[in-house]
Amino acid sequence: MKWNEFADWGRKVADWTQDYHLTVGDRPVRARTEPGDVLSALPETPPETPEAMEDIFRDFEDMVMPGITHWQHPRFFAYFNSNASAPSVLAEFLASAIAPQCMLWQTSPAATEMETRMMDWLRQALDLPEGVAGVIQDSASSATLAAVLTMREKALGWQGNEQGLFGQKTLRVYCSSEVHTSIDRAIWVSGIGQQNLIRIPIKGDWRGMDPEALETAIQADLESGLQPAGVILCVGGTGTGATDPVEQCLEIAEKYGLYTHVDAAWAGSAMICPEYRHYWPGVERADSIVFNPHKWLGVQFDCCAHFLKNPDDLVQTLAISPEYLKTHGKDGIINYSEWSVPLGRRFRALKLWFVIRTYGLEGLRERLRNHVNWSQALHDRLAAEPDFEIVTKPMWSLWTFRFVPGSDPGLYNLDDLNLRLVNAINDDGRIYLTQTRVDGDLVIRFQAGQFETTEEDVRMAFDVITEIARGLL
């Protein structure tokens, strides 16, 4: 393809994209292909000669699209949404068109300086104090890894990168049983080791970490000659929305000089609404905070907001500056590649700029509040049904339930019954849900967060769930 042919195809792709988003609600939410269907449809060998774009695009529709689960579907109530609002798609198009590599200030000054400004816009939106700095990471997993590496280096007097962990004191990191598996991976990659990630018991309706148990674990490790390094807190965990008592846990971590990281990957977006901030009181005391605008703010994946009380700690942990990466003659610049594990960086700030300006903070707040209110209304309706049991109450727009037939529950293996229910719902195609486990029991999750979801979409979930559940009997 020559560039003088690009505009025609660009218009065709734009028209296709608009039609897709306007009609995606008519499709089954989850892909209906079987394992290997797409692979077998794709030729085993690459073409030796050029092929026409008409043929390529036709094959995209015939081969690729049947194997896509539609994350932009308004009744995608599974996992956490990965939203792509219209202005975000346009910004991603432009970023792809100019294709900058934004690792240093000099390699794209606009990208660096817009990232600085957009992260400060988000800081203000969350009402975090002035002086808190931010960087855009690809995902919360990368931000958590950066935080774990930083807590490792601080605990070892900045000698871990130089000397390795051999011969050092055994490091310990503390979290609840409700944190995301990205914490486990960060512990593996950092070399701290799985057995040194200490799971603190949970308690209360929020299924949060027990602060007394946290302090007991820290004291026990100190008495055993081990080295506490940091505490990772959860706000809006993936399974049930579990949320630790942030302020109490941060006080304990400060008492023992431990680095703290707050993982609010999903729920952090809700904190642009002042009425939800009671879920993380004292968060401004944390060393590191992460949330994903690509989950609930309409900013296309990938775009992760990572806030730091003292970015110098992160830079000291990750920065490497060979001569070819130095910018001479410019003072006071930021090179965000020194704040991230990867060297290469995409122009992600452009998406934030487009989305925030297009909707304004109040427009984004309205969407979030609607999702929460509609989800809680669905919760109330299902709670009133005789054959359903609410397992965990709503945390923002997320809650869990089980189908428990009232006539004689002992007739059924409830784990098996609920797994059959969630599979039947997803095979039906009108909505998409996922399962999790709460205290060992298999339960079904519901969360509303797709950017174009309507109240009617959420109401439909009630009809689908109850209809299919009772059909199983």
Image (spheres, grey):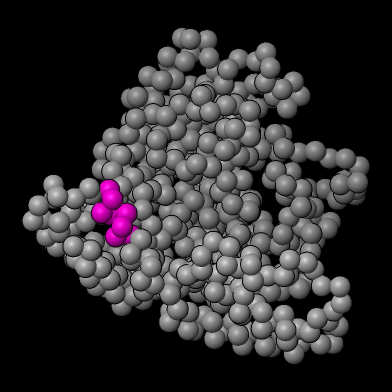
Q: Is residue 190 left or right of residue 237?
A: right
Image coordinates of residue 288 in percent, x first then y, are 55, 41
Rendered position, 364 above or below 124: below
Q: Is residue 196 left or right of residue 103?
A: left
Taking the view exactly as shown, the residue that stands out farthest to the left is: 407
Residue 258 visible to an observer of this rendering: no
- The residue sitting at 59% across, 52% down in the picture is 139
Image coordinates of residue 68 in percent, x first then y, are 54, 69
Quarter of the image with the N terminus is bottom right
Image coordinates of residue 77 in percent, x first then y, are 39, 64
Residue 46 on the magenta segment: no
Quarter of the image with the C terminus is bottom left
Choose top left, top right, bottom left or bottom right for residue 154.
Answer: top right
The kind of secondary structure the magenta stretch mainly shows is helix
Tell me which segment is drawn in magenta: 415-422
**Which of 344 and 30 lies nearest the eye of the viewer?**
30
The mark total stands at: 0
Rendered position, 346 above or below 48: above
Residue 379 visible to an observer of this rendering: yes
Rendered position, 247 above or below 23: above
- The residue sitting at 84% across, 87% down in the picture is 4
- The residue sitting at 73% across, 27% down in the picture is 161
Image coordinates of residue 44 in percent, x first then y, are 73, 66
- The residue sitting at 61% across, 50% down in the picture is 134
